[in-house]
Image: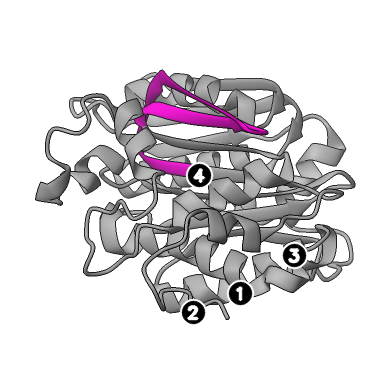
């Protein structure tokens, strides 16, 4: 059987995820027969957590379903070394030595990791928060609020997604921002919201389901989640002037500053959320929570 080519080139960032999903889309067809896949990264020149988590989840899912995956490593030594250090090759099942001293990632980045449980997710979220705390102005004063919101985003994977790959998380600080991403390959936001009969008829497309899911107190399983994680995470990004994307099945919601745009995109079998916080813009979370004040005493977890 001939190899199925997945050829990627240039920069792989948040804005390039639809192209990545498009190259992978035929492999998620229910009639696709497991066979050899060639992930060709030779011409990749730059890669960020958004793409790393998507590629990692794809390789794990393909291996689970009986495909074989051959990876051609980037010709760029810098990109190849970064994928090595960030543990992409390990999770892709590749035996690749790391020839340099392995310096601590604390406060700088969180290697890509496949999170297997809520408890492990809480630990990883704590490490991601340490990166935000160190690199984004104003986070220290609102640590609990941001921590709670992102933890709920991760917990959604275990309460809603039914993902065979669990959650895959990665984070990286840059001089201008901190980017973090969490991906699963579960049933997606539309199916998750469909569990809640109160939401029946409130969305048609996947893009509409995402727009609904990022509203306050919207959840498929109110007995498990408050429905605040995605909403407040995106509100923090908007107030910070950053960028974000929530991508599920064939819908996506892109946030750039205060602007949010929903669109139809190539299919992804699950949900991918990426948040990018500017380093130089503090977030006034108190104002955000006051604007969307919940019932009395619901702020107890914050203050």
Picture residue at 30% right of the left edge, 34% below the top: 209
Left-right relation of 40 to 2: right
Picture residue at 66% right of the left edge, 65% below the top: 128
Disc 2 designates what residue?
301
Q: Is residue 257 magenta?
A: yes
Q: Nearer the viewer, mark 2 or mark 4?
A: 2
Provide residue 153's location: percent of width, then percent of height. Answer: 45, 58
Q: CA distance from mark 2 to mark 1?
A: 8 Å
Q: Nearer the viewer, residue 36 or 270?
A: 270
Residue 129 found in image quarter? bottom right
Could you tell me which secondary element the residue under label 1 belongs to? helix
Q: Main secondary structure of the magenta part?
A: strand
Q: Is residue 140 above or below residue 179?
A: below
Q: Is residue 132 magenta?
A: no
Disc 4 designates what residue?
273
Q: CA distance from mark 1 to mark 4?
A: 20 Å
Provide residue 77's location: percent of width, then percent of height. Answer: 85, 38
Q: CA distance from mark 2 to mark 3?
A: 17 Å
Q: Which residues are magenta?
A: 249-272
Could you tell me which secondary element the residue under label 3 belongs to? loop
Check whether the beta carbons of the residues at disc 2 and disc 1 lie within 8 A of each other.
yes
Mark 1: few/some/many CA within 10 Å (<14, 14-19, 20+)? some
Q: Is residue 30 above or below residue 124?
A: above
Q: CA distance from mark 1 to mark 3?
A: 9 Å
Residue 202 found in image quarter? top left
Disc 1 designates what residue?
144
């Amino acid at each position: 059987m001939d190899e199925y080519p997945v050829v990627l080139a240039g920069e792989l960032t948040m804005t390039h995820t639809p192209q990545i999903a498009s190259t992978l889309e035929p492999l998620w067809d229910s009639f696709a027969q497991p066979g050899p896949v060639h992930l060709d990264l030779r011409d990749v020149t730059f890669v960020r957590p958004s793409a790393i988590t998507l590629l990692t989840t794809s390789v794990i899912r393909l291996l689970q379903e009986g495909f074989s995956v051959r990876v051609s490593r980037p010709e760029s030594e810098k990109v190849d070394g970064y994928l090595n250090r960030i543990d992409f090759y390990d999770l892709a099942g590749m035996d690749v030595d790391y020839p340099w001293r392995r310096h601590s990632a604390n406060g700088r980045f969180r290697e890509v990791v496949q999170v297997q449980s809520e408890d492990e997710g809480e630990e990883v979220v704590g490490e991601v928060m340490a990166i935000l705390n160190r690199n984004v102005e104003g986070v220290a004063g609102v640590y609990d609020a941001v921590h709670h919101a992102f933890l709920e985003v991760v917990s959604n994977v275990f309460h809603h997604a039914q993902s065979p790959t669990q959650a895959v998380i990665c984070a990286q600080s840059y001089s201008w921002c901190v980017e973090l991403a969490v991906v699963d390959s579960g049933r997606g936001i539309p199916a998750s919201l469909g569990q809640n009969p109160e939401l029946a008829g409130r969305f048609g497309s996947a893009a509409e389901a995402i727009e609904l899911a990022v509203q306050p107190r919207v959840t498929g399983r109110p007995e498990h989640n408050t429905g605040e994680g995605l909403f407040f995470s995106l509100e923090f990004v908007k107030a910070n002037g950053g960028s974000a994307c929530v991508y599920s099945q064939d819908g996506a919601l892109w946030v750039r500053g205060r602007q949010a745009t929903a669109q139809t995109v190539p299919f992804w079998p699950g949900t991918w959320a990426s948040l990018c916080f500017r380093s130089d813009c503090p977030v006034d979370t108190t104002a955000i929570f006051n604007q969307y004040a919940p019932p009395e005493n619901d702020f107890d977890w914050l203050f």
